[in-house]
Image: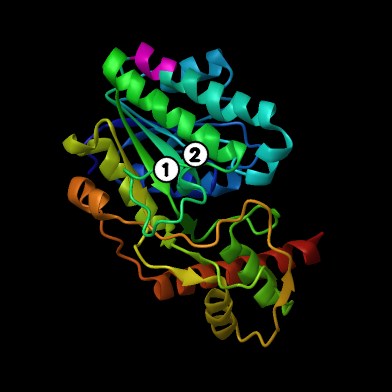
Amino acid sequence: MMPFTSALVTGGAGFIGSHLVETLAAGGCRVSVLDNLSSGKQANLGALADRIRLIRGDIRDPAALEAAVAGCEVIFHLAAVVSVPKTAEDPLGSAAVNETGSLQVLEAARAVKARRLVFASSSAVYGDEPTLPKREDMPTRPLTPYAVQKLAVEHYLRVYQSLYGLETAGLRFFNVFGPRQDPSSPYSGVISIFMTQALKGEPPIIYGTGRQSRDFVFVGDAVQALISAAQAPSAAGMVFNVGTGTAVTINALWQLIAALSGSGATPLHGPPRPGDIPYSVAAIDSARANLGFVPRVSFENGLKLTMDWYRISAVEGIRSERDR
């Protein structure tokens, strides 16, 4: 059972959000979801339709927010423009969602006297600060509007706790992966894209040398960090890294996925992408100490679970095309 009885998940039809909603509902929590379905999918919540309250609306709409937060003890704020390139193409439009929209969520939480608000931030706030591993107390050097917007909301969290007494916590997610990550988007995670290409027998495109590294954390572990951040007394007012503390190169990632899928495709190499961070790995000492966070799913097991899901998804996609 959950230690809280009711929760709102903004962006709850998205990749991480839908896994969080599923876990909350399974624990007996009354769950409301606010999602405009611009990137999330109602199908991600299909099995939960009769167990949750889904409001199709935007975090920038005060009326939708007021309806969504009503009676909610804890608010998980995951709704965002998650595409880094989109925020670079449209910094004003993305800031209207990621900054102003988040401020409206904070205001709505304050209005209903929510017990705590947990915000999905990003490791992107560290930018190209070269020190490894990334620690929460090191300088932030955001390189993109997306990173700036996430960092701005972190500052609002601190202000809303100190000024208004609204308990807040932020989680700087590193590279979250797992089932339901949409591979059809060019902005999707590299694992979902690689897996889809591997199953099609297509060569992946690796930008740069492939020696750049990432800290990949399974979505189930990310969900546990979110739930812990909503209840741990020492989490209030803090921001935590959520990763594994282990780095994997992009070249090694493809080799593992190729072995799982049986793909013999040779990667193609493209030019490095602007703003791409070469090396990233999380220090998770603070999350371990304050949230009791310990990644439970190994990278290899997470890849296998994800590949199994993509195989089933690919078969269902072929059936759907055939039945049209």
Q: Report x, y in % for residue 183.
A: 65, 59
Residue plotted at (72% across, 67% down):
319
Q: As displayed, is residue 140 above or below residue 101?
A: below
Residue 262's label in the rendered image is none
The label number, if any, that marks residue 12 in the structure image: 2
- Mark 1, Cα crowd under 10 Å, few <14 / some 14-19 / many 20+, is many
Q: Viewed as shown, does residue 78 lie left or right of 295?
A: right
Main SS of residues in magenta: helix
Q: Secondary structure at mark 1?
A: helix
For image coordinates 48% across by 37% down, the residue present is: 78
Across and down, in percent, residue 175 comes to 48, 57
Q: Is residue 111 magenta?
A: yes
Give the secondary structure at mark 2: loop
Q: CA distance from mark 1 to mark 2?
A: 6 Å
> In the image, is 128 to the left or to the right of 120?
right
Q: Which quadrant of the structure image shows residue 209?
A: bottom right
- Please name the residue that numbered disc 1 is placed on: 21
The residues colored magenta run 107-112
Please tell me which residue lies in front, 168 or 6: 168
Residue 5 rendering spot, x and y as whole percentages:
27, 32
> What quarter of the picture does the N terminus occupy?
top left
Q: Amino acid at mark 1?
A: Val
Structural crowding at the residue carrying mark 2, measured as other residues with C-alpha within 10 Å and reported as few (<14), some (14–19) or many (≥20): many
Residue 57 visible? The answer is: no
